[in-house]
Amino acid sequence: MNKLKFILSLCLFLNMSCFANPKEETIVCIHGFLGAPWNMYFLKKNFEKHGWQVINWKYASRDQTISEHAQELITQIIKIQEDNPDKQICFVAHSLGCLILRAALNVPNCPKNVKTSKIVLIAPPNNGSVWGRTLDRFSLFKKFRKDFSGKELCSCENFDHLGKFPESANILVIAGNLGFNPWIGKENDGTVAIDETYLDTEHKHVTIRRGHKTIIFSKKTFSLALDFLRDGAIN
């Protein structure tokens, strides 16, 4: 009987361990332009399966400037920290979300410990977007993208005005090259050229065979992000 109790207790312990959070960290997911939280659901669901707490941040991408979105993101981050004071925050962002995060880490009230986060940037237009500037020649598109963050995306050749990512942050950029956009004229994901995804500050960079919209639903993207957030490595 004692042996049976021991075996049952051991099985219960092992089962509970499988669901224990392996990291004392929270992941904040940030979708891109014209996106919504469901765009990041594939990544969120899979991170949660591995025991992470995930916050899928929602914002109306067309209705404010990048800097205004950034201030709202910092307000959310401060609230997350208040609710989880013992957890470090990591970030996984896509496209415009990467620029909002970049701006957020440079606002005056950004918590200092957030500047040491692990960050995964997926298909970020860090050096602007040739395709965006091409579309912006058409008046109908200008009306559609509005005069806030969409205008910035389609007019800026770089985003130096947002500030740089902190040197203390550990950053991975995941770019896609499954694009056939002749207006870009370089290897691209259909929306952003690979050379537009690089930062001029220290970071890791990897390119995978995915398009701009589908890259966030890729098992390869998730695998790279998971390994990086776990131990800062790319496997």
Image (cartoon, rainbow, N blue to C red):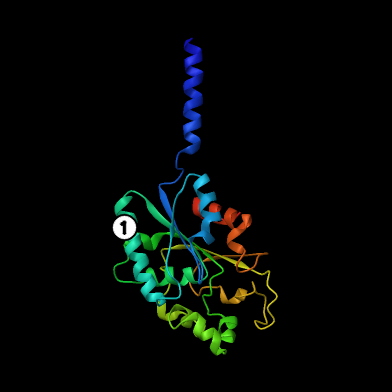
- Taking 25 as reference, is 134 above or below it? below
Query: For this rendering, which residue is in front, 89 or 36?
Result: 36
Residue found at x 48% / y 38%: 19
Query: For this rendering, which residue is in front, 109 or 46?
Result: 46
- Taking 74 as reference, is 82 above or below it? above
Number of marks in picture: 1
Residue 40 seen anywhere in this rendered image of the structure:
yes
Question: Badge 1: how crowded within 10 Å, few (<14), some, or many (20+)?
Answer: few
Residue found at x 51% / y 81%: 144
Query: For this rendering, which residue is in front, 51 or 231?
Result: 51
What is the quadrant of the C terminus in the image? bottom right
- Taking 46 as reference, is 163 above or below it? below
Percent x, y for residue 111?
31, 62
Percent x, y for residue 89?
40, 56
Q: Secondary structure at mark 1?
A: helix
Instruction: Identify the residue under disc 1.
Output: 79
Image quadrant in which you'd find residue 79: bottom left
Percent x, y for residue 138?
57, 89
- Taking 49 as reference, is 141 above or below it? below
What residue type is disc 1 on?
A: Lys
Residue 163 seen anywhere in this rendered image of the structure:
no
Residue found at x 56% / y 73%: 197
Q: In the visual, does 62 lie left or right of 188?
A: left
Percent x, y for residue 216?
58, 61
Q: In the visual, does 26 lie left or right of 190?
A: left
Query: For this rendering, which residue is in front, 28 or 199?
Result: 28
Residue found at x 68% / y 69%: 178
